[in-house]
Amino acid sequence: KNEVEQSPQNLTAQEGEFITINCSYSVGISALHWLQQHPGGGIVSLFMLSSGKKKHGRLIATINIQEKHSSLHITASHPRDSAVYICAVQGPNTGNQFYFGTGTSLTVIP
Amino acid sequence: ETGVTQSPTHLIKTRGQQVTLRCSSQSGHNTVSWYQQALGQGPQFIFQYYREEENGRGNFPPRFSGLQFPNYSSELNVNALELDDSALYLCASSRSTSGISYEQYFGPGTRLTVT
């Protein structure tokens, strides 16, 4: 079993739709990261969370430490949001090791 | 742009050879982490360097080794290359306090192909 599970694996949305990507983890963490990876490999760090909620533009990330669950929301989705979104966690219980989900591939259709 | 650079961008090597990949961290960052991402997979943590010492390691064999220099740049060395080592190698820099890392900034990656 993976330490980090994401859902859905693939997601297709119409431009303007509200999108939610979920992440569940099984290890104790000090922080959870949401990353965005475009075709060609470049990774951008979107959020680092240890509690509560963060917002940046049309992106919102929430985390529930007790339930070991995080969500990434995209409001008013746009074709340029098409990318792979990856959830990653780091420990005090992971020995500085980062565990990654396998990613959610998002395609936003105009 | 994150300020994290990696070289080379692409590399082709033959099975059994050795390779060195380089990463320059963002200004003010003292920690570098290395990841391997096989095609269609999520990144896998290789190891992390903090203040020139290894500060955590994933499930990779000893032929994967690293260095961090006083300017916090880093190298990843892979000996006795195998076909399965073909992947995108990503480095990420961050600022750490007492060995705990804060937000990571990723470089563009080095695409290694082993034939």
Image (cartoon, coloured by chain):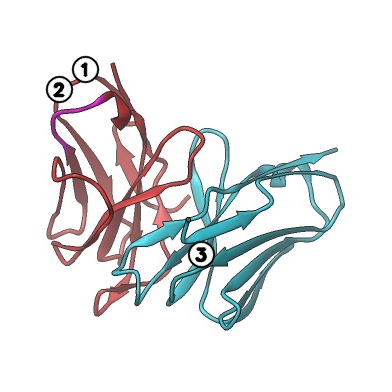
The crowd level at tag 3 (other Cα within 10 Å; few <14, some 14-19, many 20+) is many
The percent position of residue B8, horizontal first and vertical second, equals 29, 32
Q: Which chain is red?
A: B
Instruction: Give the magenta part as a residue range.
Output: B78-82
Secondary structure mostly taken by the magenta-highlighted segment of the chain: loop
A2 magenta-colored:
no
Proximity of marks 3 and 2: CB atoms separated by less than 8 Å = no
Protein chain holding label 2: B
The percent position of residue A90, horizontal first and vertical second, equals 40, 68
Q: Which residue corresponds to mark 3?
A: A33
B79 magenta-colored:
yes
Residue lying furthest front in this view?
A: A1
Q: Which residue corresponds to mark 2?
A: B16
Under circle 2, the secondary element is: loop
Q: Amino acid at mark 2?
A: Gly
Check chain identity for marks 3 and 1: say if they share one. Answer: no
Q: Is residue B16 above or below residue A16?
A: above
Q: Is residue A45 left or right of residue A84?
A: left
Q: Amino acid at mark 3?
A: His
Under circle 1, the secondary element is: loop
The crowd level at tag 1 (other Cα within 10 Å; few <14, some 14-19, many 20+) is some
Under circle 3, the secondary element is: strand
Distance from label 1 to label 2 (Cα)? 6 Å
Q: Is residue A4 above or below residue A48?
A: above
Q: Which residue corresponds to mark 1?
A: B14
Proximity of marks 1 and 2: CB atoms separated by less than 8 Å = yes
